[in-house]
Amino acid sequence: MTTQEIVSKLWNLCNVLRDDGITYHQYVTELTYILFLKMAKETGTEEQIPEKYRWDELKAKSGVELKKFYKELLSELGDNGTGRIREIYQGAATNIDEPKNLEKIIATIDSLDWYSAREEGLGNLYEGLLEKNANEKKSGAGQYFTPRVLIDVMTKLMKPQVGERCNDPACGTFGFMIAAHQYVAEHTDNFFDIEDADMARFEREEAFTGCELVHDTHRLALMNAMLHDIEAPITLGDTLSNIGKSMHDYDLVLTNPPFGTKKGGERATRDDFTYPTSNKQLNFLQHIYRSLKNNGKARAAVVLPDNVLFADGDGEKIRRDLLDKCNLHTILRLPTGIFYAQGVKTNVLFFTRGKTDKGNTKEVWIYDLRNDMPSFGKTNPLKPEHFDDFIACYADGDLSKRKETYSEENPNGRWRKFSIQDILARDKTSLDITWMKTESDTDNYTLAELLDQIKEKSQNIAKAVSELEQLIGEVEE
């Protein structure tokens, strides 16, 4: 049985739970509580779980007794567990009302082909579930889930090395750090090439860290990290609050921060930002370039929406600060439809922190993977080969080997260089640059995507009308 087949079997169980009114996201969280116990048994690491709350005890119960025991188990492990167990189960509560449904989940998990799952890697199995959840529109979990293919490209170009401190300040389910860890593993014979015991411990316990704001997502990140043998801390908290001030001196940051403004439009609660703003992505961008070591080698690859490239006011000040403190050498303009939130236009910014705080960017190379591209989505997913030309143009980050494909003779070349003078001369120091002439300037959306957009816009209009009516009512009174 392949990992994919196991994932499908586990995912189909979700249909059993629909009657209990459970959402997809709740299901993955619930599955995490139960899978943890089974995986501990399968990997011979049950000693960290009190004997009376281990897998065989859970499996032996049924009916109302099982439901009562399961609730007690969640509470006990959350309150009195130690280390990662406590972190995963803290505040855990079940959404399953019907004992028969709980029995079915336990029996199905118990009957899976665990030998195959172990061979292929339990981490791969769990990541498969997380991806399935993100792909399921109704779950809402995938709204800004970063496609694995994009994570892999960003990681490959940034080349995490042994001994480097890597971080994701908005880590979601920990996908970027898992990819960074796997990249280092692949280049060190699964860490066996690391002969220094202290360095091996560092890789396991300190090298790959993150921070996540949402409690349930944080649990999934912890489980994901544990199944990939990563024991480094994953903080439950808000990077844009003062917690984020302790997150610094990194060699590499890989991240896709959440989009949007802070609720109520208030500014970040961090008191060390030079340009505090209500735009979350601009705050994350400030945090990221400030969190890198200023040794001329520390680097970042960050997914950001278009507004970061053109927002005025503080937006312009933050862009200028970035261009000064870092060498913003590359911008990859991503195609539309690769995130499940409709119509979100995004980019990857690649930059290296300078040794000084001034004049580090000399030229910015932009690759346009958006214009004249098919519309991506569930039926037409992004594939590794879509990035082949960009990777070749990137030239391993060696700017001296880069060659533009754009020219006057080839105005639709996707790869173009802009000097810092060109950038600074632009209105608002905008980095929102396009030059390709396409036959049609309209985006190619599928019918389903167009319907989703229409629904979203009509909801926004309805909301605006009701707020306006309320205002008018207050004025008339």
Image (spheres, grey):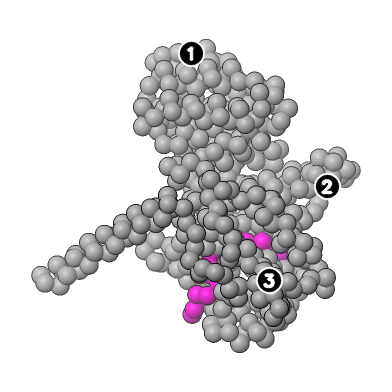
Residue 81 lies in the magenta-colored region: no
Mark 2 or mark 1: name the one nearer the start of the chain. Answer: 1
Q: Earlier in the sequence, mark 3 or mark 2?
A: 2
Camera-nearest label, 3 or 2: 3
Instruction: Look at 60% across and 23% down and name the residue there.
Output: 38
Q: Is residue 356 left or right of residue 270?
A: right
- Secondary structure of the residue carrying numbered label 1: loop
If you read the primary sequence from the N terminus, does the residue marked by circle 3 or circle 1 appear first? 1
Q: Amino acid at mark 2?
A: His
Foreground pick, 463 / 28: 463
- Name the residue tied to disc 3: 413
Which-is-in-front pick, marks 2 and 1?
A: 2
Q: Residue at x 73, y 46 (%)?
A: 181
Q: Judge whether 50 appears above or below 29 on screen.
A: above
**In this picture, which residue range is highlighted in magenta?**
299-313
Looking at the image, is 118 positioned above or below residue 461?
above
- Which residue matches tag 2? 187
Q: Is residue 139 visible?
A: yes
Please rate how many residues cluster around mark 3, counting C-alpha atoms within 10 Å: few if below 14, some from 14 to 19, many from 20. Answer: some
Residue drawn at 58 percent across, 64 percent down: 372
Q: Nearer the viewer, residue 7 or 163?
A: 7
Q: Is residue 431 above or below residue 338?
A: below
Q: How far from the left and from the top, in percent, is residue 26?
A: 45, 36
Q: CA distance from mark 3 to mark 2?
A: 34 Å
Inspect the image, locate mark 1, and give the three-letter code of the amino acid beneath it. Lys
Name the kind of residue labelled 3 in the image: Gly
Residue at image mark 1: 61
**Quarter assignment of residue 160:** bottom right
